[in-house]
Image (tube, rainbow, N blue to C red):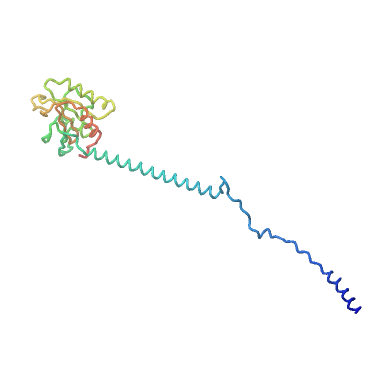
Amino acid sequence: MAKRKGSAGKAAPAKQAVKEAPSAPQVFDQAAAPESKPKATGGTISRKEQMRAVAVQKRKQQNMMVAGAGVVILLLVAVTVFINIRNSQPVVGETTYPTQGNLHIPLGSTSSLTYNSTPPTSGPHYENLAAWGIQTQNARYEHLIHNLEDRGVVIYYQCEDGCPEIVAELEAIVEPYLADGRHIVLTRNDPTWVVGTSQPLHKDMGAPIALAAWRKLLLMDEVNADTIRTFIERYEGIDHHRG
């Protein structure tokens, strides 16, 4: 009975000798840990987002510029078409005649070809032309036809009494054009004008006023400033040396 007690007393101290081993410290691999990124909060954005926003804005500006250029081009085309259509329309009351050519004839001679209009608008003529401006002397058709060929408009007036009022109105219309160097002649048409024993060098044009350009003729009974300016703007400045 005494041995059992002794063995029991020795076992107890051995049981107490067993102690709990301390836990190993935790070690974290910083290289393996995911890198934390700042999150955009409030009014801040990342650089990538800024660049994306700038690119979007540039594209919008480029699109607006392209659209604006397209509108300008369309307007220019529309204006060009309008001008071409307007210029292709005849001035009210004008007549267009077939061309009678650009033949040069000797100075002082008369055309062997009967002109198809009075005053003539094309046909045989002299190599030199009448002076641009307001003529105080009669001028041969053969001179004035060359003026028409050489970008000009010739305005004739025909009155038995000289019609000073009409002449004054016509001069007031053409003077600004002449001051700008435009190709215009204002002259008299005189069916009674002869040189020596020749036939009259002018023919009766059947109206007080005639506007002549190459192949174009407009007869008028009275001065209409708007019509005259329209005729000048339409036909002055066009070269017709090719017929």
Q: Residue 50, percent across and down?
A: 53, 47
Q: Residue at x 12, y 28 (%)?
A: 207
Q: Quadrant of residue 8?
A: bottom right
Q: Residue 147, percent across and down?
A: 21, 31
Q: Residue 62, percent across and down?
A: 43, 45
Foreground of the two, 40 or 133:
40
Foreground of the two, 132 or 186:
186
Image quarter (top left, top right, bottom left or bottom right) of the C terminus:
top left
Q: Going by the image, does 11 lie left or right of 230?
A: right
Q: Is residue 120 above or below residue 188?
A: below
Q: Going by the image, does 7 lie left or right of 164?
A: right
Q: Residue furthest front?
A: 1
Q: Residue at x 65, y 59 (%)?
A: 33
Q: Quadrant of residue 200?
A: top left
Q: Residue at x 57, y 46 (%)?
A: 42
Foreground of the two, 215 or 110:
215
Foreground of the two, 5 or 28:
5
Q: Residue at x 14, y 27 (%)?
A: 221
Q: Residue 81, percent across and down?
A: 27, 41
On the question of residue 123 being in view, the answer is no
Image quarter (top left, top right, bottom left or bottom right) of the N terminus:
bottom right
On the question of residue 237 being in view, the answer is yes
Number of marks present in the image shown:
0
